[in-house]
Amino acid sequence: MGVIKKILIANRGEIACRVIRTAQRLGIKTVAVYSDADARALHVDMADEKVFIGPPAAVDSYLNTKNILRAIKDTGADALHPGYGFLSENANFAKALDAAGVVFIGPAPKAITVMGDKIESKKLASKAGVNTVPGDGGAVKDAKEAVSIAKKIGYPVMLKASAGGGGKGMRIARNDAECREGLKRASSEAETAFGDGRVFVEKFIENPRHIEIQIIADKFGNTVYLGERECSIQRRHQKVIEEAPSPFLDEETRRAMGKQAVVLAKAVNYVSAGTVEFIVDGDRNFYFLEMNTRLQVEHPVTEKITGLDLVELMIRVAEGEKLPFAQEDIKLNGWAIETRVYAEDPFRNFLPSSGRVSVYRPPEESDNLRVDTGVYEGGEISIYYDPMIAKVISYGPTREDATAFMSRALDEFLIRGVRHNIAFLAALMAHPRFAEGRLSTDFIADEYPDGFNAGGVPPDDPNLLIAVAASIHRAYQERASMISGQIEGRQRAVSDEWVVVLHDQSHPVRVAMRDGNYEVSLDGVDIRIRTDWKLGAPIFKGTFQDQEICLQIERVGVAYRLTHRGAEADVLVLNATARELQMLMPEKVEADMSKFLLSPMPGLLASVAVEIGQDVKAGEELAVIEAMKMENVLRAERDGVIAEIKAKPGDSLMADQVILEFE
């Protein structure tokens, strides 16, 4: 090393932190840029220098090329790493850096231009002999043309933003009406996210797998593929779980996909790390989807199975070094899985969640576990950016091992203050279909058609939550018997018989406590729980019938909220009399809010589609809210008449704020 002395990272969050770690290991100074919203962010604290670049909105800060170029000049940075998103695939920005004599740690502007444009990249791929998805390939002018192309190709089709990525600007259409609506939404979302509203139409492959090939190329014409990543588990075209290698590919298909990825990269003289994405059908036929001319969010799984640091390779290639290996040197060892922890509420249709992270305790890292994050305890999840909290990466000799390590890590990952999707991720890890490797991009839609509800006890251990709750309660009662005020030298007797209430069902239990361990009698079954758990600790580790367990505990009123492997339940532990009285308590009736349209999340009210006095039918669009880089369409749940509109486009909304009222 030695050519690059100081790198400015034109990004934020976990990817900025990740680039900083490698740069510092290599002895390279780092510069962080930040907006008003990120003044106290983790990446700002980690870097050697920091520069303010503007207001919270990305267009005024992280997408503000003028301010970033000024930051480079002011700090004397001689190189820039763009991370992913923001300016990472902006060819004009890469040209400006070149003109300023700054090393861009990424591909040349020409490659970004051609491969970053889905329309042009598809044409080039087809010309290079790469398998492509049937489609017109050109940007559509209007809804009429989109419908005409869709009919020619045959439904279902995908409407896709030419400059898109990360699941933004994409809609599936199965008929003319959905095609018109999808074009409108995809174009609007793409314009907001990328400043480019062009959309094209292509055939949608039913039940496909999303499998991508990681490549790395130097300036001497050496291009190597580093295996594949399975990214099929997605929600709204946003990846949720990735793994390497794929449980579906055989060596022949892997080699064929890798060779096509290399051919495509060489066709544009590609240099640096990049990813060629394919969709794969049930017969292992594969079709080019797009090329991402940047580092991918899911790159850690490739790093784990190859032993390579992709950020380091990007830096070395940018300095003009040759790749230190050839294709035959690449060996894939073991299995890696990545889950994306987002600030969103899976129990409320994955609505984004923002606010302060009051508790943040990630699982302990090891050779089998890595956590990439840009969040810390006391930090803020902003409404202005992607809702990612962290990436959890597990690694083991086999897929089963990697899955077990991941499940344990998710159970141990403690976050409070914002809602998050850890329960959902844990449920996916425990899903039989995931264990079998029967994946497709429709996995979540197929398995959770009515949304996610993890309120049930895991089917493989129905007594677990009951026994743990009873044991916890017994420990609290033991402590209560020894508090000050008791008669000296005596101890109040602690009952060992309780009624545990789970999902309104009563379960009589008997609990004995010996040396901090518990013997629980439940429905005639003797259960052994061994643990060193201490009162008040939010994580309960131990064994249940000699099997390792890890649960999270939270007090909610008089109940214990327990979370384990995607199951979340509020459990009451009462004596017999208290249970009898509790059953006589009237249920609290929630206020009727059906007359109001409430904002389901903090965000910006982008548009209101109705007027006062207008008749609306169930399913009609009422308003659109922009939050965390996504457009969320709010629709009428019933027929009605608009009585009053209480917010206007451009307003910043709080969660549950009234937008409009029905008669």
Image: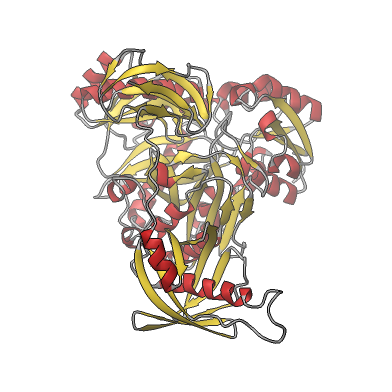
Left or right: where 479 falls relative to 473: right
* Residue 228 visible in the shown view: no
Q: Residue at point 22% right, 30% down? A: 174
Identify whether 468 is placed above or below 518: above
| 649 vs 75: above or below | above
- Residue 55 lies in what quarter of the image? top right
Left or right for 60, reference 51: left
Q: Is residue 652 left or right of residue 521?
A: right
Question: Where in the figure is residue 245, as x and y percent of width and height?
Answer: 43, 56
Q: Nearer the viewer, residue 361 or 470?
A: 470
- Count of marks, rendered view: 0
Please report the residue visible at 60 percent of the width from the left and 37 percent of the height from the top: 83
Q: Is 377 drawn above or below residue 69 in the view shown?
A: below
Depth check, front residue: 310 or 326: 310
Q: Residue 85's quadrant in the figure?
A: top right
For the residue pair 454 and 139, the one nearer the viewer reads as 454
Location of residue 98 in the rendering, given as x and y in whole percent from the top left corner: 67, 24
Q: Position of residue 276 (x, y in %)?
A: 44, 40
- Nearer the observer, 174 or 608: 608
Relative to 592, does residue 142 appear above or below in the rendering? Answer: above
Q: What quarter of the picture does the C terminus occupy?
A: top left
Colour theme: secondary structure
- Identified at 56% across, 58% down, the residue is 413
- Work out whether residue 409 can be spotted: yes
What residue is rendered at 57% in x and 74% in y? 477
The image position of residue 521, as x and y in percent, is: 41, 82
